[in-house]
Each structure stands twice: as C-alpha cells, then as structure tokens.
Amino acid sequence: MLLNTAGSAPFADITNYYGHNVSVIDTATNNITTNVTGLNYPFEIAFSPDGTKGYVVNLGNNTVSVINTTTNKVTATVDVGINPEGVAVTPDGKKVYVTNAYNTMSL
C-alpha cells in the first residue's frame, strides 16, 4: 500500500492480486471510492513524486500499467521482464525501475 495525494484528499491505493484491480481508498472516510480495473495480478504499486501517476506491476502478463490518479484509469501498459515484483520511481519522476524474477531489472 502506498499513499497518493492527487486531488483534494489523500488516498491509499491497494493492489488486489486475485481481484485484478487496485482499490482507491479515501483515508478521510476509510471508504473505497473506486476500483481501477484492467490489471492482471497486480502485485505492487509506486507513485510519481507529484502523485499524478501510479505504476502497477502485473505478475500475470509481465507488464507495468500506468494509472492516471485523477481519473483512476489505466493510460498505458508497458512490457517488462518475467514476473515483475517490485517497482520504484526516481525522485525526479523521470525513470521507473522494475525488479523481475531471476535477478533481472527493467527500466
């Protein structure tokens, strides 16, 4: 779980591996505001420094999905290595690093 501060209130975005989605929770009310769909066994999420994009690693199809945190829609999907498991965004937001199984990394 990571917090995303896009919009007027902070939100917690939770990956639901078997649900194939990400739940967006308003931390002021503790209610799910929406579920981002179109994911394939989402495992982990990281956010751009400005909170406008979420990067979700999908174990099911070896991709990273980019989520617009204002619309809560997937805007792009990028192929990465086999079994992506971790994701990190550089402090300037220009690069996204993905760790894959078998000691490999995607950039």
Image: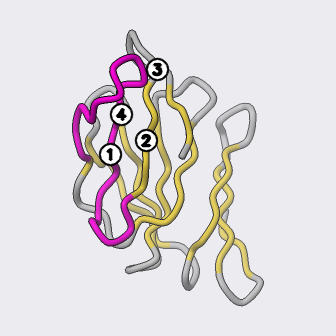
Q: Which mark is residue 25?
A: 4
Residue at left 32%, top 72%?
18
CA gap, disc 1 and disc 2: 6 Å
> Where on the picture, by quarter, is residue 89?
top right
Judging by the rendered image, the residue that carries numbered circle 2 is 13
Q: Is residue 47 left or right of residue 77?
A: right
Which residue is identified by label 1? 23
**Earlier along the polypeptide chain: callout 3 or callout 4?**
3
Asked if marks 4 and 1 touch (Cβ < 8 Å), the reply is yes
Q: Looking at the image, which is closer to me, 87 or 81?
A: 87
Badge 1 element = strand
In the rendered image, the residue lying farthest to the top is 8
Mark 3–mark 4 Cα distance, whole angstroms, equals: 9 Å
Q: Position of residue 56 (x, y in %)?
A: 47, 56
Mark 4 → mark 1, Cα distance in angstroms = 6 Å
**Alpha-carbon span between mark 3 and mark 1:** 14 Å
Closer to the N terminus: mark 1 or mark 2? Answer: 2
| SS category of the residue bearing label 4 | strand
Judge whether 74 appears above or below 106 on screen: above
- Which segment did they paint magenta? 16-35
Amino acid under disc 2: Asp
Would you call the spot at circle 1 few (<14 residues within 10 Å), some (14-19), or many (20 or more)?
Answer: many
- Residue that appears at 65% across and 35% down: 93
Could you say whether the residue bearing mark 2 is in a helix, strand or loop? strand
In the drawing, what numbered circle is on residue 68? none
Which residue is denoted by mark 3 in the rendering? 10
Q: Amino acid at mark 4?
A: Ile
Q: Is residue 98 above or below residue 67?
A: below
User: The disc labelled 1 sits on which kind of residue?
Assistant: Ser
Tell me whether the residue at label 4 lies in contact with that at label 2, contact meaning CB atoms closer than 8 angstroms: yes
- The answer to if 82 sits in the magenta stretch is no
